[in-house]
Image: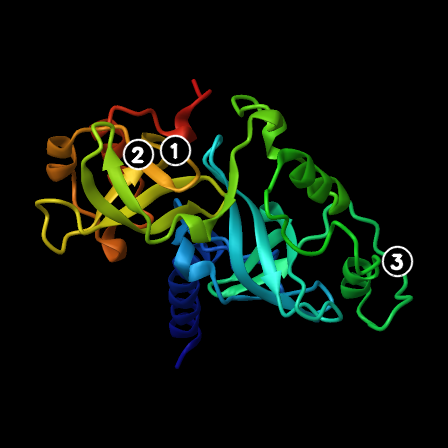
């Protein structure tokens, strides 16, 4: 190969690598990614509430913190307020609630505890992991451990303060914390749905959660009257709760029967689909509120 041919080969390789490198950087695998880089999905990223259950949470020191067993819903603002962990080291059967924003998604199926501004010192207890130690060193009868039979806004605010997280209810457009209606997701899953006229029209199959901030984008319905096996996604804001366990859909039986079907493989993180569903039910998407 002569000198001219060598130069041409090198130039060809450079031009081939440029688009490849651009693609890699666009996907979040550039020089800032590296080992332990945060998961940065493209577009609007959501997941099913049922998918969240069972995932393990680690500490920034790669220790095991617990397994997600449930989450607490802020019905008033349509958000996941807290994530509940079980099998937490040194806590026995006690459960541990942490703010949703204390979870950092580090991979497709992995989560890490985010300490926020929480003070993390040198381990003084049973654990050598400073994060695990800081979380589990409180007295066994502390309000930090276990889930109250009635979840109130003061307790949620206490949890946020303790774990050094900014309260989402201080954001513009969110309802004040005193107005919160809070409950675990176990009350929602499988519940029947009625119209405002009292007609039984569907069952709640799952939730679709916005991974960026915990907003509940949709309630996924099954056994929808007149729809056979088709699933239907309805904006969370179209629901209201009565008597603690009765869920009412603020629409008619006919409108629900004609609503767009939901296919989780095609529609889960499809923003165009989400916007069309919100328009169908006459609601403004939460992600567009307050934007010019």
Q: Comparing marks 1 and 2, which lies closer to the viewer?
A: 1
**Residue to which mark 2 is pinned:** 248
Question: Label 1: few (<14), some or many (≥20) within 10 Å?
Answer: few
Q: Earlier in the sequence, mark 3 or mark 1?
A: 3
Element type at marker 3?
loop
The CA span between labels 3 and 2 is: 48 Å
- Residue at the spot 82% in from the left edge and 72% down from the top edge: 127
Label 1, on which residue? 242
Image-quadrant location for residue 216: top left
Q: Badges 1 and 2: C-beta atoms under 8 Å apart?
A: yes
In this view, 41 is above or below 236: below
In percent of width and height, residue 172 lies at 56, 22
Which of disc 2 and disc 3 is earlier in sequence?
Answer: 3
Please say which color scheme the image uses. rainbow
- Percent coordinates x, y for residue 101 in the rendering: 60, 46
Spot occupied by residue 173 in the image (x, y as percentages of width and height): 52, 22
Measured in 3D between alpha carbons, the distance from the residue under mark 3 to the one under mark 1, in whole angstroms, is: 45 Å
Q: Residues within 10 Å of mark 3 (few under 14, many from 20)?
A: few
Residue identified by numbered label 3? 121
The answer to whether residue 37 is seen in the rendering is no
Where disc 2 sits, the SS reads: strand
């Amino acid at each position: 190969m002569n000198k001219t041919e060598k130069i041409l080969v090198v130039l060809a390789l450079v031009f081939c690598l440029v688009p490849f490198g651009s693609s890699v950087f666009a996907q979040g695998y550039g020089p800032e990614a590296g080992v332990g880089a945060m998961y940065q999905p493209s577009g609007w990223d959501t997941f099913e509430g049922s998918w969240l259950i069972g995932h393990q949470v680690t500490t920034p020191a790669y220790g095991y913190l617990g397994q997600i067993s449930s989450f607490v819903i802020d019905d008033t603002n349509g958000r996941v307020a807290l994530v509940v962990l079980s099998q937490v080291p040194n806590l026995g059967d006690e459960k541990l609630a942490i703010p949703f924003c204390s979870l950092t998604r580090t991979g497709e199926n992995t989560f890490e505890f985010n300490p926020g501004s929480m003070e993390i010192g040198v381990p003084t207890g049973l654990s050598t992991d400073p994060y695990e130690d800081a979380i589990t060193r409180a007295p066994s009868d502390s309000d930090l451990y276990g889930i109250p039979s009635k979840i109130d806004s003061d307790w949620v605010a206490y949890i946020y303060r303790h774990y050094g997280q900014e309260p989402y209810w201080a954001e513009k457009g969110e309802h004040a914390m005193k107005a919160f209606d809070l409950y675990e997701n176990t009350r929602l899953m499988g519940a029947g749905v009625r119209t405002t006229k009292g007609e039984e029209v569907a069952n709640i199959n799952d939730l679709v959660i916005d991974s960026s901030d915990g907003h509940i984008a949709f309630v996924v319905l099954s056994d929808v009257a007149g729809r056979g096996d088709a699933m239907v996604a309805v904006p969370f804001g179209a629901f209201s709760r009565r008597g603690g366990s009765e869920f009412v859909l603020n629409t008619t039986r006919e409108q629900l029967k004609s609503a767009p079907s939901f296919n989780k493989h095609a529609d889960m993180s499809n923003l165009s689909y989400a916007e069309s569903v919100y328009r169908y039910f006459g609601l403004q998407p939460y992600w567009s509120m307050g934007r010019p």
